[in-house]
Image (cartoon, helix red, strand yellow):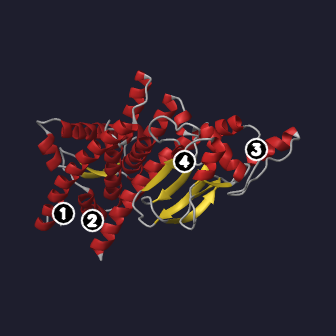
Amino acid sequence: MGLLLAIVGGILILCFLVFIHEGGHYLASRLCGVRVTEFMIGLPGPHIGFKHGETKYGATCIPLGGYARVCGMEPGEMQPHLKEVLASVHRRGTANMEEVAADCGITDDEAYNALEELVEWGSVAAPTKKDKYNTYRAMEVRPTKRQLKKAAAAGAPEPQAWDLGQARPVDDAEQLFQHEYRQQYRSLPFWKRAVILVAGVFMNLLFAMLAFVVIYSIIGFDYQVPSTGEMLHITIPPLDAITAGFTYIGMVVQMILGLFNPQTAAETVSNSTSVVGIVAMSKTFFEQGLVDTLFFAAAISVSLGIMNLLPIPPLDGGKLAVEAVQKVSRRMVSPKVQTGLSMAGMALFVGFFLIMLNQDIQRLITGYWS
């Protein structure tokens, strides 16, 4: 029973750390005015929850980690005809690909591609499994409290509320398109995109720093005086605890960079562990008490954050590198190139994972973590 509880605890720690990482992306996106259509605990899949504003909150059937669906992060140039297609769906309320194509004078393929991008934007609702024909729906619109107060203060009529799939007049297609475009990640300047991408790493490191302050400055730790052998329980100032945290972060950075140095890669991999190893080690830390468990969580949080900063797609650092290249070259990196880079990055990390997983299995067999 103790082992089972330790495994569950280890999994919960990993879930929590991934959750706060995604929470960083969510908060930064909302502060930058970007729409986030989903913020879930767990991997993408069937889910339960509730909707508040434009965002669905809840949990999926695979409660490992979490994700935030930030709108407008699709790679490459925007699809043409988005403005006309968006206006067509809003005027009709519900429409299929063929109807939109006829309205806009474009091909079915062009209509489909534009509709799918608008789904990613959160501007159009995707077809459901119950639809006999692939039916797209105009998104519901509910005025915010701020909009209602602003209208009341100006003596203007209340903003109109529209239900999902309800037809509505579109007086200015350009204005409607700009309203939706301004809520997309792709509409932001480079520095705001960078903030959103590194916000998850920031949350992981912030949690680690808070954990170090709690451990060293509030709970305290045991220290043996070298000259007398006397054991003392001491605390240190928060600034010193933060300094210790930064020192530890520097050690993690050096260790991770060792993965890409041919002279140190083998040693670094042998000293590393996979998710299986992390869960297995959690039993030892839980048994040692709160301080060790908190330090364990802080250490994993730092590793998760720093790993995500590596300039390898599909990690956050890889996405930031792509954004930097596009900023400097003033050209979009094609979706094909980004997909290729992501596949190469995934292959690299899968290779590392398999090696570490084999090590962890051997450690379990030999009782290394017992």
Sequence order check, earlier mark of 1 and 3: 3
Amino acid type, mark 2: Lys
Q: Which residue is mark 2?
A: 283
In contact (CB < 8 Å): disc 2 and disc 1: yes
In this view of the protein, which residue sits in the foreground, 217 or 349?
Answer: 349
Q: Residues within 10 Å of mark 1 (few under 14, many from 20)?
A: some
Amino acid type, mark 3: Gln
Q: Residues within 10 Å of mark 4 (few under 14, many from 20)?
A: some
Q: Which residue is mark 4?
A: 108
Marks 4 and 1 sit apart, C-alpha to C-alpha, by 59 Å
Sequence order check, earlier mark of 4 and 2: 4
Sequence order check, earlier mark of 4 and 1: 4
Marks 3 and 2 sit apart, C-alpha to C-alpha, by 51 Å
In contact (CB < 8 Å): disc 4 and disc 2: no
Instruction: Check disc 4 and report its element: helix, strand or loop.
Output: helix
In contact (CB < 8 Å): disc 3 and disc 4: no
Marks 3 and 4 sit apart, C-alpha to C-alpha, by 37 Å
Q: Is 168 left, or right, of 315 in this rendering?
A: right
In this view of the protein, which residue sits in the foreground, 137 or 181?
Answer: 137
Q: How many marks?
A: 4
Residue 5 seen in the current view: yes
Q: Is 207 left, or right, of 155 in this rendering?
A: left
Q: Which callout, 1 or 3, points to the residue nearer the camera?
A: 3
| Residue at image coords 74%, 43% | 170
Marks 2 and 1 sit apart, C-alpha to C-alpha, by 8 Å
Amino acid type, mark 1: Trp
In contact (CB < 8 Å): disc 3 and disc 2: no
Q: Is 215 left, or right, of 369 in this rendering?
A: right
Q: Position of residue 77 (x, y in %)?
A: 48, 34
Q: Which residue is mark 3?
A: 147
